[in-house]
Image: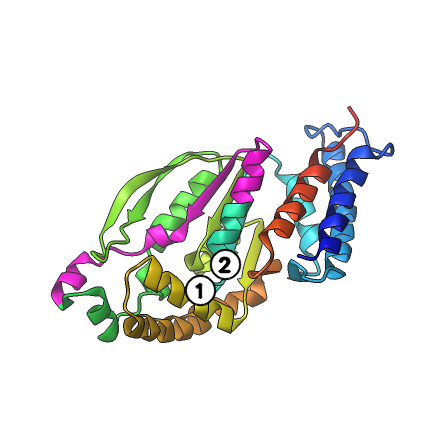
Amino acid sequence: MTEEDKIGISHLIQKELNSSDKILKPDFNQKTGRELLAFYLQSKFKQLLAYDNKAAEPIFIEVRYDFIQKFSKRLIQNPEKRIMIGVTGESASGKSTICKEIENVIERFNMPVTILTTDNYFNDISGLIKEYGTFDNLRDNGYDVDSPNSFQLDVLKDDLDKISHGEDIYSPEYLLNGTGVSVPKAKFVPSNKIVVVEGMASMFGDNKDIFDIKVYVETDLDIRKERFLTRAYTERNQDLENAKKHWEYILGAGEKYVKPYRAEADIIINGDSNLAYFSQILEYIHTITNNFEA
């Protein structure tokens, strides 16, 4: 993020806070109040996109032409439903990092948010790993770990439906210790007003239809490769040869199973964005959605 970008977005935030031309806080219990809010947010979000488009390192790569109108309509028609945000992208694109930043910013403003990772919905393959000796042997013998068939999509669909309607859930937990064990109903997941679901499986099947906002994270291939190999070596104790072999697998799997959902995304964002700038963008969105005259 350039110093100019940093100053620019800070200026936008202060301009909103200090503006004497604020609208009265709408009555969200009334349809007319929600319609006023929707119109207001549409105009402000368009201003934000125009600003970001001029930044040295934009966050938004692409925004679907009808997204703002579609999301506004959803807020008007069904205000009680949780705001469901699905985040997908190929491996090492930056999904988890961006979701963590979303969580940090939202919590800083005391807004309840839930982050749910679909990696915990991998099938239990402990029996197969015992049969083949190791996960790597299983993969090398043709097990397609990133295929939609390798996830508990029915369980995920049921959990997403419950959490979107205000019901807390217990999600599975897939153990990242090489055993392939999935523990059912192991992690408590509260149903907060904003629910962010991240991972490649978030868009598989008709699960994608539950999301109000579908986000695709895109990052340069060389950056993704460097991230993946570094993570494999430093966090997962993989030797370089095996890490490179697995990179070749996920490269093909991402092209086959994940990349097609880029065309269905409402927003495509840069997964190599400066997190400080991204944080300020989120702060600006918070400001415009909460800065009304009493």
Q: Where residue 209 appears, x then y in whole percent? A: 52, 54
- Residue visible at 72% across and 36% down? 34
Quadrant housing the N terminus: bottom right
Please tell me which residue lies in front, 165 or 220.
Answer: 220
- Residue visible at 68% across and 28% down? 29
Q: Residues within 10 Å of mark 2 (few under 14, many from 20)?
A: many
Is residue 292 visible in the rendered structure shown here? yes
Residues shaded magenta:
102-131
Dot in front, 2 or 1:
1
Residue beneath disc 1: 227
Secondary-structure class at tag 1: helix
Q: Of the numbered discs in the image, which one, if any, rests on residue 51?
A: none
Give whichever of discs 2 and 1 has the lower sequence position. Answer: 2
**Residue 138 covered by magenta stretch:** no
Quarter occupied by residue 229:
bottom left
The residue most toward the front is: 3
Please tell me which residue lies in front, 148 or 241.
Answer: 241
113 vs 99: above or below:
above
Residue beneath disc 2: 94
**Mark 2 near mark 1, Cβ–Cβ under 8 Å?**
yes
Q: CA distance from mark 2 to mark 1?
A: 9 Å
Residue type at mark 1: give it.
Arg
Is 82 displayed left or right of 43 in the figure? left
Q: Where residue 25 appears, x then y in whole percent? A: 76, 29
Please tell me which residue lies in front, 10 or 288.
Answer: 10
